[in-house]
Amino acid sequence: MCVVGLFTACGNSSQKNAAPTGNNDSLFVSGSFAGLDSGSVLLSTSKDNDIQVADTMFVHGGRFEGKIPLSSVSLILVATNGQQLSFAAKAGELVISGKVDSINDAHITGTAIPHDLEEYDSKSRVLNDSIAAHQQVAATFNRETTAATKAEWLNKMQFLLAQLWTVDSIFIEENPESYMSAERLYQSNLERFDLARFEKGYNSLSDSVKAGYYGKRAFKLLETLRKPFPDIQLNDVKGTPVSLLSLKGEYTLVDFWASWCVPCREEIPNLMAAYQTYKDRGLRVVGVSLDTDKKAWLAAIKKDAMSWPQLSDLKGWDAASVKLYDIKAIPDNFLLDKDGRVIARALTGQHLQQKLAEIFP
């Protein structure tokens, strides 16, 4: 299940009356979290492109229950003790059971769970568990960890993420009427996207799904991504101010990196191979560094034999480019078309080669 930011407002209180039941225009929720014997559980849903608390379910004897209006498949959020569980549901009944210290792993059953989610949830859970386990491996790396080991780890992570993206794409294509298709379309394109795939996925959604909470958010994100890549002026290696977009070609890869970033440096040979293959066909590469030490920056450029233009304001994570382009981690990159429009983001390894082979047939 998906975890989103905790919504802390309060809604209408729910009294301990005879248990209500869901019908064609309402959702009845009941359940328990081991370790939660009193207090309350917030029940929220999406409405008017926002998340609103629909009921406050008070815990009696370790159990809670509540009923909210629900006319179509919607995003449902259950929150307590600083944690939140989110899932899609339709009108009907569902039962939640889990532990108060890990409600995101709760088990959900009932007529309110759309059947089209069962197979997808099974596949995505396996992949998400594999990704989480692989992330734990990186936590064991130290100074003695070889570059080959780190490169192998990165390749496997890219493979797992690509599989998850494929599972998402197939689900979206096969379930245009599913609310979850819009949710996965939005979430999977937040930080790594392919504009053509995003547009195809969005256009496949039904009108009712587009009008829902995540349908509207996906449209807003898509409109943002369709806008021209904003320009910025940064110094080149000689200290001369240069407009980034003045360096663009038929296609331009804007690569964010730093001399101290090991994964960035390990990706350079792959980037170099791509540049050498497609530079005579219109590919340009522009490096934007998050370094603060000019000597280290220049030394890395020389050592890795990067022959494309390099820019930096040498302000590290305080760089103007970090805020302008919403850089949260490096390596990161944007692939621009000739009009300066972003057509893909976060292309590394085989995914970079595949995308370039697609646009340079």
Image (cartoon, rainbow, N blue to C red):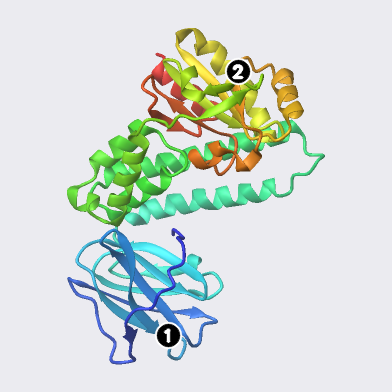
Quarter placement of the C terminus: top left
Question: What is the quadrant of residue 298 in the picture?
Answer: top right
Instruction: Tell me which numbered mark, 1 or 2, is placed earlier along the sequence.
Output: 1
**Which three-letter amino acid code belongs to the residue tagged 2?**
Met
Q: Which residue position is annotated with label 2?
A: 272
Q: Nearer the viewer, residue 190 or 70?
A: 190
Q: What residue is pinned by disc 1?
A: 63
Number of residue marks: 2
| Marks 1 and 2, how far apart at CA | 59 Å
Relative to 2, does residue 194 appear above or below in the rendering?
Answer: above
Left or right, residue 21 beside residue 293: left
Three-letter code for the amino acid on which mark 1 is drawn: Arg
Q: Secondary structure at mark 2?
A: helix
Instruction: In the displayed orientation, state which residue is furthest to the top.
Output: 280
Give the residue drawn at x 37%, y 30%.
228
Which residue is pictured at 38% across the width and 28% down the height? Answer: 341
